[in-house]
Image: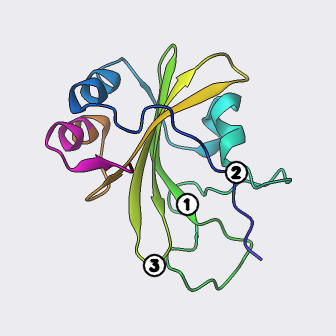
Amino acid sequence: MLVEPLAIAFTEPGMSSAKRQAFLAEDYKILRTVNAFPFAILKDFKRQGQDSLAIADPGQAFEATDVITDAALPRRRLIFAGVAKESAFVHYERGGFGLSFVIEFYHLESNQEAVGLWRGFCDRPAKSLDDLRLSIANGLCRGSE
């Protein structure tokens, strides 16, 4: 049986386009491995009741479709993430009936706690932070409301 992380309740599902653009305007340090995530974010990507991660690093195997061939593989794979002083985002692929390109915004309360602010689905994976900013500005990433 595939074990997923606990669902995150995002506090601003209707976040405006202007606010999303402002969120991504910060000076982010780009992260290319899951283990580089701050603990506050990393714990949201652990499987329920386990220490194993429910997200793969870029280039690693993951379940990209709804046909589960190996329940040990995660259904998510990191594209890239970013961390600023009190903000973070995670951009990843999510397998299922159709492959999705997800972006999630977080407010970092501390190293131990993060609040999920907004989740969106993009038309395509971003190649860089600048590309992600353009996707947000051009309406290519929409909220999951």
What is the distance, in whole Å, between disc 3 and disc 2 at their CAs?
20 Å
How many numbered tags mark residues here?
3
Q: Which residue is mark 2?
A: 6
| Pick the front one: 103 or 72 | 103
Identity of the amino acid at label 3?
Phe
* Rendered image: mark on residue 8: none
Q: Is residue 141 magenta?
A: yes
Q: Which residue is mark 3?
A: 97
What is the distance, in whole Å, between disc 2 and disc 1 at their CAs?
14 Å
Q: Residue at 72% of width from left, 39% of height from top?
A: 43
Dot 3 or dot 1: first in sequence order is 1
Placement of 44 over or under 57, stated as above or below? above
Q: In what element is the residue under mark 3?
A: loop
Q: Which residues are magenta?
A: 133-144
Q: Is residue 81 magenta?
A: no
Q: In what element is the residue under mark 1?
A: strand
Which picture quadrant has residue 109?
top right
